[in-house]
């Protein structure tokens, strides 16, 4: 089974105000840390700016999206620890969603059986 991580993130003022040499040094550090991920079976499925939604009321406020695939939850957790260790969350407003692989019938069953509290939305 494949395990996934979906990230949504937006630069904070701390990133936007960081001097270019410091910003480049930080990104070089991130790039170096990423080099060994493929050896662990990590796949980058997408790392890109978020695209505008044709239905803007459903757009995320975040500017960037990361979608990753992992061979195990432990490898996914190791990446999350590594991200935190780099200070990433000091520079980016960030939301993660972790999920294990699934299919449409299972998902529809999960939705049907969901008895959790209603989501808090602006329209609620």
Image (cartoon, rainbow, N blue to C red):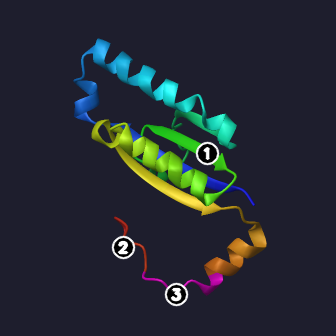
Instruction: State the residue lying farthest toward the top.
Output: 21
Mark in the foreground, 1 or 3: 1
Q: Estimate the x, y position of residue 75 in percent, counting from the top left.
A: 59, 51
Q: Residues within 10 Å of mark 3 (few under 14, many from 20)?
A: few
Can residue 111 be seen in this snapshot?
Answer: yes
Which one is in front, 81 or 123? 81
Q: Which mark is residue 68?
A: 1
Q: Estimate the x, y position of residue 51 in percent, counting from the top left.
A: 53, 37
Quarter that holds the C terminus: bottom left
Which of the 4 image quadrants contains residue 46?
Answer: top right
Mark closer to the chain start, 2 or 1: 1
Highlighted magenta segment, given as a residue range: 112-117
Taking the spot 28% from the left edge, 36% from the top edge, the residue there is 12
Secondary structure category for the residue under label 1: strand
Taking the spot 37% from the left edge, 71% from the top edge, the residue there is 120
Can residue 43 be seen in this snapshot?
Answer: no
Q: Which mark is residue 115?
A: 3
Question: Which residue is identified by label 2?
Answer: 124
């Amino acid at each position: 089974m494949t395990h996934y991580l979906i990230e949504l993130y937006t630069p904070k003022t701390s990133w936007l105000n960081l001097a270019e040499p410091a910003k480049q040094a930080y990104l070089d550090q991130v790039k170096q840390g990423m080099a060994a991920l493929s050896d662990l079976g990590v796949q980058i499925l997408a790392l890109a700016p978020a695209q505008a939604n044709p239905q803007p009321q459903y757009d995320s406020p975040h500017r960037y999206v990361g979608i990753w695939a992992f061979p195990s939850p432990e490898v996914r957790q190791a990446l999350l620890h590594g991200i935190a260790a780099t200070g990433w969350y000091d520079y980016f407003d960030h939301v993660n969603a972790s999920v294990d692989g699934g299919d449409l019938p299972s998902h529809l069953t999960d939705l049907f059986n969901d008895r959790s509290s209603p989501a808090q939305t602006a329209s609620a």
